[in-house]
Image (cartoon, rainbow, N blue to C red):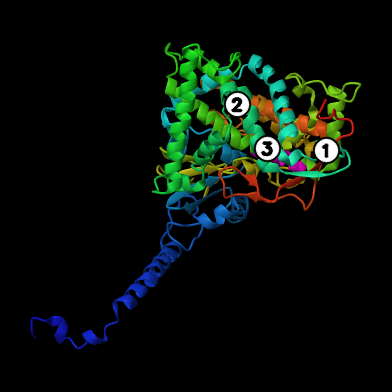
Amino acid sequence: MSKNLLADLPLFIPRDQLPSLPVLALALFIGAPLLAVVLNVAHQLLWPKDPTLPPVIFHFFPWIGSAVSYGMDPYAFMFANREKYGDLFTFILIGRKMTVALGPKGNDMILGGKLSQVSAEDAYTHLTTPVFGKGVVYDVPNHVLVEEKRAVKAGLSLENLRSYGPDIEDEVELMLKTDASFATYRSKNANTTWGSFPALKTLSELTILTASRTLQGKEVRAALNKSFAHTYEALDGGFTPLNFMFPNLPLPSYRRRDKAHKEMSDFYYDIIQKRKEGISEVDDEKHDMLASLATFTNKDGSGLEDREMAHIMIALLMAGQHTSSATSSWTLLELANRPDIQKALYDEQVAVLGKPDGSFRPLDYDDIKSLTVMDSIIRETLRIHAPIHSIMRKVVGDIPVPTSLAAPSESSSYVIPKGHFVMACPGVAQMDARLWADAAKWEPSRWTDPAGFAAMAGNQYDNGGNGEALVDYGFGVISKGTQSPYQPFGAGRHRCIGESFAYVQLSTIIAAVIQKMELKLVGGMPPPNYETMIVLPKAPDTIMYRRRVAAVPASA
């Protein structure tokens, strides 16, 4: 046999009969992924399973896993797999192993988890840091975040919250007087002619206008022009599922995000410098967040750095804007779809705030507590339209799963290993038909039954009811809320500290709108959009309106 072994062996195909390079490339292009799918399926079906690990959802495609079905409708995905696997299961999401723990006990395990076991910073910093900036939120150790939350909470003082109502009402009035969508409201036939406005677009603008005038500061409100809007839009473009899954892609949107962050950071930094130099552009700044941050002292006696303050302000602007615009949009859509609830809300406004001439006195902070219909409406909207459907943590230390949540046998229990991610879905518990009567129905009256399930859940979340302890993570005493089936603002150490402002903003906007206009919905409720980080209504989301006969005319 010659040295040219391949040429001498008759089993080899003659060179002139070999397929062409394009054919080989096509075969590899089709064959390699197909082989990967086959091997992945075989591994799941034939490979012995580790009895200490939660069950893994069957998936055809490696790496991609269940990303498509989860992304299309997270709630349908969760409820369907709960029926198959129980409250604890793992799925593959773009190369990440996500272990889901559902229900109140699952939420408690994840959101009440120890810092030695779960890390929010490791789960989210690659998404939030490019948008919010360095040195804040998830770009710092937890003890630094605690100090920053303490600083923000100081800015949400009762004195400040009391001052915000009139400014928010003024912004609603200004929009009705100037926005093109409300031309019908300003017409002579406003009481008999129906106009329309897009819910999400309108409420997004209104929430940023009201937040900037109150919490953010009057300099920010004065700067809300087209240039600011473009900067905000570019920065907001970095807060998407794509950026979460692939944080470092060389895309134009990522470059626009980074440029916008620098511009926004410099914008706040410039305001801070002018205030320090005594050349502020506003006369009264004592009630806004920047004024509070500037005088805040850390436990070690130091103050906040100027860039740190600027980036905290960006975080407040972005995070609060998304959740408030979503909740206010869903609230008005639901009210437009339920004229009976809308009438009950208006009647309550008349009873509490109405004046003999048919107008209304300003909504005071203390009035919010007495508006039980308003409170029920906001709570129910947050229950059925949770702004965030999934809350993630990275596992930094093995987590033994409580037997009460899930266990493969009486003698062993599951362990979620370091390196996995864990996912809580409070919205699943909030819409669980096993817990709530008519769970899928928007029914605010459930919250006014003092002996009902909703009242119990709300009390447990707000006040540590049913035995759950009140705790202080370093920024003030709160109810953990991790065991409650109702968690509209998260729970545990990362529970949102902006609840109080959110209620002021939402209550005042909704009250001002309902006092002035009747609403109706044509075509039914729009479906939710799960392609965004915050669950928003899909278009068309048009609300019809006409001016109320008893409302004060816009020209008054």
Q: Give the mark nearest the N terminus, 3 or 2.
A: 3
Query: Looking at the picture, how far across and down is residue 5, in whole percent?
Result: 13, 81
Q: Give the mark nearest the N terminus, 3 or 1.
A: 1
Instruction: Tell me the SS state at disc 3.
Output: helix
Query: In the image, which residues are magenta?
Result: 326-334
Identify the amino acid type marked 1.
Ser
353 left or right, relative to 87: right
Q: Which mark is residue 187?
A: 1
Q: Which mark is residue 272?
A: none
Q: Give the mark nearest the N terminus, 2 or 1.
A: 1
Whole-angstrom CA distance, mark 3 to mark 1, is 22 Å
Q: Is residue 327 magenta?
A: yes
168 left or right, relative to 143: right
Query: Looking at the picture, how far across and down is residue 167, in whole percent?
Result: 69, 22
Identify whether 390 is placed above or below 1.
above
Identify the amino acid type marked 2.
Arg
Viewer-nearest residue: 416 or 345: 345
Q: Which residue is mark 2?
A: 221
Location of residue 6 by image quarter? bottom left
Instruction: Tell me the SS state at disc 1.
Output: loop
Q: Is residue 364 magenta?
A: no
Query: Looking at the picture, how far across and down is residue 530, in whole percent?
Result: 60, 49
Q: Which residue is mark 3?
A: 203
Whole-angstrom CA distance, mark 3 to mark 2, is 16 Å
Please give the name of the residue rendered at 53% of the width and 36% of the height, measured from the top-left corner: 232
Dot 3 surroundings within 10 Å: few (below 14), some, or many (20 or more)?
many
Identify whether 468 is placed above or below 393.
above
Q: Mark 2 touching mark 1, by CB under 8 A?
A: no
Q: Mostly what secondary structure, the magenta segment?
A: helix
